[in-house]
Amino acid sequence: MSREPRGPVSRRRFLALTGAAGLTLLTGCPGPAPSSPGPPAPAGLRLRAAPMRVDLAGRAVPTWGYGTVPGPEIRLRAGDTLRVRLANELPEGTTVHWHGLAPPNRMDGVPGITQDPVAPGAGFDYEFRTPVPGSFMYHAHVGMQLDRGLYGPLIVEPRTEELAYDREHTLMLDDWRDGLDGHTGHADPAEAPADDAAGTVSFGGRSYPLLLVNGRPPEDAAVVEVRRGDRLRLRVMNVAADTGFRFAIAGHRLTVTHTDGMAVEPVTVDALRLGMGERYDVLVDADRPDGGVWQIAVQPEGRSGWGRALLRYTGSDASRAPAVAERPAELAGRLAEYGDLLAREPLDLPAGPPDRQYDLVLSGTEIGGQSYPDADPLPVAEGERVRFTMRNTSAKWHPMHLHGHHFQVLTAGGRGPVKDTVAVPARGGEVTFDFLATNPGRWLFHCHNHHHMEDGMVRVVEYGPAS
Ligand SMILES: [Cu+2]
């Protein structure tokens, strides 16, 4: 996929590295000045997975994480080589999956498919090039480990940034119960989801006591600081196990520029919907003449609960912050739907019908009538144009994620967004996407509701000879 920059290069943009969610891992380097064109090439990054405590509004609860929740931000430039040494200090095996990236198969971090879990006390060196820029995530991919704190943001910057903005911030949205009730995140049969009322948008059925934004509960919200007149870039990422979110900012609109890291024609809306595993980049103009402190609203779809962060104009009185539970009208405003989004650079797919097509019914425990691990591989051959059509017969939405590839969602006459995770609506909802089979190996295709995944909503796309 060609990534030629279009449009003018920003002069006012700079990298607000210190404003990002976590630390930038820059081993052996003091870090760039804010006006630097980009961070130095990362080398020797280290991720240490270990038991830890996370402070939830003054309550320190035990979890597993990479030192902080979210884990440290990893930031590279397109074409760099990611080198991460995973040190496993957990009492069980673990791996890291690079969500949205297309690494060589052996670096994909999926136990039983591409990699044996890294044993307790052992380490593993992940190393691969990252040619495609975008907003990605990394997370553990063993059992329900992701439901703990084992996740973080991974940003690949383009060599030439085409967007103009003054500062940026990453917001990771999560559902949380680790350490709060002795629960380690495994599905509780007593919480088996009941069917929702028709028309309810629901991605899962479990209850989670807290929703976190950048590891912070609503009572101790993360603050995004802006100056009046700033254009802010937000990278919003849903890393939850069981919760889809509606996202909005009181008093401000959102201009969507990317989905799952891939550029779309800009469209201005009031709210986003993010299934688990999805990311949206938006631009926000901090244009309130009176400044202030504004709710960044994170409302779960189809269930109770509430998360938030705060947008604070520098110098504004923090005591003017909105009440914790104040829900802005923008949540019910215009929503960015897939049909609104046009790929800036559609995938370069061969013309004509697909070489191979799979029609897959999503049931909640099965994909295409089979439940993993009692499931056949889905064969593809290198160079093929492959089509997946998914029809959801269940009462929950399913955010379906394909490892190792970007796909073209076939909305808007084939010019829909290029993504790696796509939410298929409940009760008969259908989504079709095409991808080009260019990354040989065995790749997971699964629901990013980790409970549904554990229940069998997993298939393996397996490269083999052409049929
Ligand atoms: Cu699902």
Image (cartoon, rainbow, N blue to C red):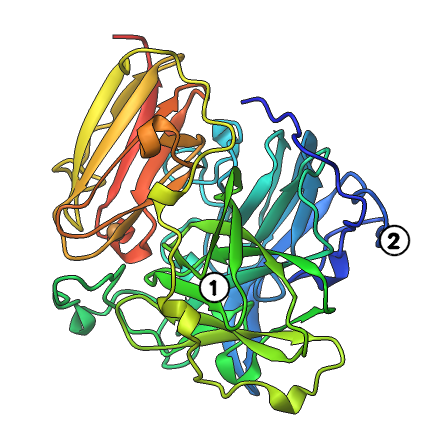
Can residue 97 be seen from the camera position used here? no
Secondary structure category for the residue under label 2: loop
Q: Is residue 11 left or right of residue 177?
A: right
Residue 327 percent across, percent down from the top left:
42, 79
Q: Is residue 85 left or right of residue 191?
A: right
Say left or right for 61 vs 285. left
Dot 1: element: strand
Q: Is residue 332 above or below residue 338?
A: below
What residue appears at the point 25 percent right and 25 percent down from the top-left corner? 378
What type is the residue that disc 2 sits on? Ala
Residue at the spot 45% in from the left edge and 24% down from the top edge: 347
The residue that mark 2 highlights is 33
Of the pair 5 and 137, the residue shown nearer to us: 5
* Quadrant the C terminus occupies: top left
Judge by depth and name the residue closer to the eye, 195 or 84: 195
In the image, 165 versus 91, the foreground residue is: 165
User: Badge 1: few (under 14), some or many (20 or more) residues near its Cα, within 10 Å?
Assistant: many
Spatial CA distance of label 2 from label 1 is 29 Å
Q: In the drawing, does residue 93 fall left or right of residue 385?
A: right
Q: Would residue 413 be visible to someone looking at this image?
A: yes
Q: Please say if the residues under marks 2 and 1 sit with CB atoms less than 8 Å apart.
A: no
Residue 114 x, y percent position in the rendering: 43, 33
Q: Earlier in the sequence, mark 2 or mark 1?
A: 2
* Label 2 crowd bin: few (<14), some (14–19), many (20+), radius 10 Å: some
Q: Residue, x 29% and y 73% (percent of image)? A: 207
Residue at the spot of label 1 = 173
For this rendering, which residue is in front, 362 or 4?
A: 4
